[in-house]
Image (tube, rainbow, N blue to C red):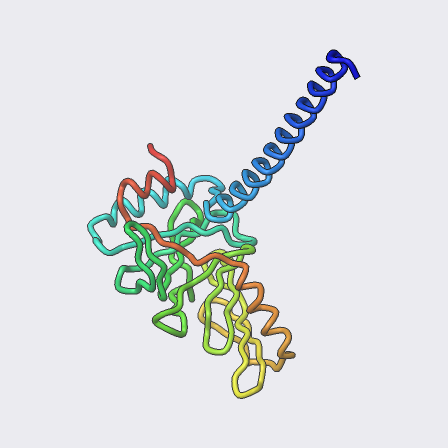
Amino acid sequence: MGKTGIRILLAVLLALSVTACAGTERDGTGAASEQGTEKAEEKTAVFAGGEREAYRDYLREREGVGDLYFACLNLEGNEPAVLALTHEKHAVDAGEETITANHIVLNNFLEGEVVQVTGSSMDTYSGNVCFFCGGGRLWVPVYGGVGSYTVSGRRIAGEVYATEGGVSTKYSVTGKKRTEPETVPAETVSGKLQEKEKAEPVRFFRNTEKNRESVFGGQ
């Protein structure tokens, strides 16, 4: 093979190498970018309308409550994002500006007002266990199982699944009312616990102007 042929062969190999590297980099970067976006979307509330401004004003009025923390959650079947509140004394894990907590109170935006959701003032079963959110549900760890909740207007709505003493049960919750427990297969409870494992801990932001702007945007 002559020098010209060798040069052509080397040029072709170099082009193929560059193309392959570019393709690999693009695929890898693209995948990572998509995963990063999905992760961000899971953790960032989506606002349906006027609740953004209403929640920001509601929290601004309570800035004097020094230990107040907030989070916004999108729950299945409830168009406005829900405003979740807690206090620093309920912290399970504390960061510089955020905490996870073992107590929660939910507020909803209805008919132009911020209203507290009946039945939503809840604790987890342990001072060392926090709340989770994922799949459009608020997950509340309870002894032997987990509660799975959303919001229906002014009331909390969901089910609690637990296994205690070898017996697995489920009961429904609407506001402050609950049904009588009914026996379910153990697999039903373990399945709900597996769903909860896919959720993310609810991380509350300290109620400061900086954090409100980060979550809700500036005026």
Q: Position of residue 15 (x, y in %)?
A: 68, 22
From the viewer's perspective, is residue 122 above or below residue 67?
below
In which quadrant of the rendered image does the C terminus lie?
Answer: top left
Q: Locate residue 87, reporting x and y percent.
A: 28, 60
Task: Single out the residue that lies furthest toward the front.
Answer: 2
Q: Residue furthest right?
A: 1
Q: Observer-nearest residue: 15 or 156?
A: 15
Taking the view exactly as shown, the residue that stands out farthest to the top is 4
- Relative height, residue 147 to residue 164 (above, below): above
Q: Quadrant of the N terminus?
A: top right
**Left or right: 17, with 41 as reference point:** right
Image point (39%, 54%), residue name: 203
Q: Is residue 98 above or below residue 56?
A: below
Identify the residue at horizontal 74%, vertical 20% (top origin): 9
The image shows residue 121 at horizontal and vertical percentages of 38, 65
**Residue 19, image x, y percentages:** 66, 26
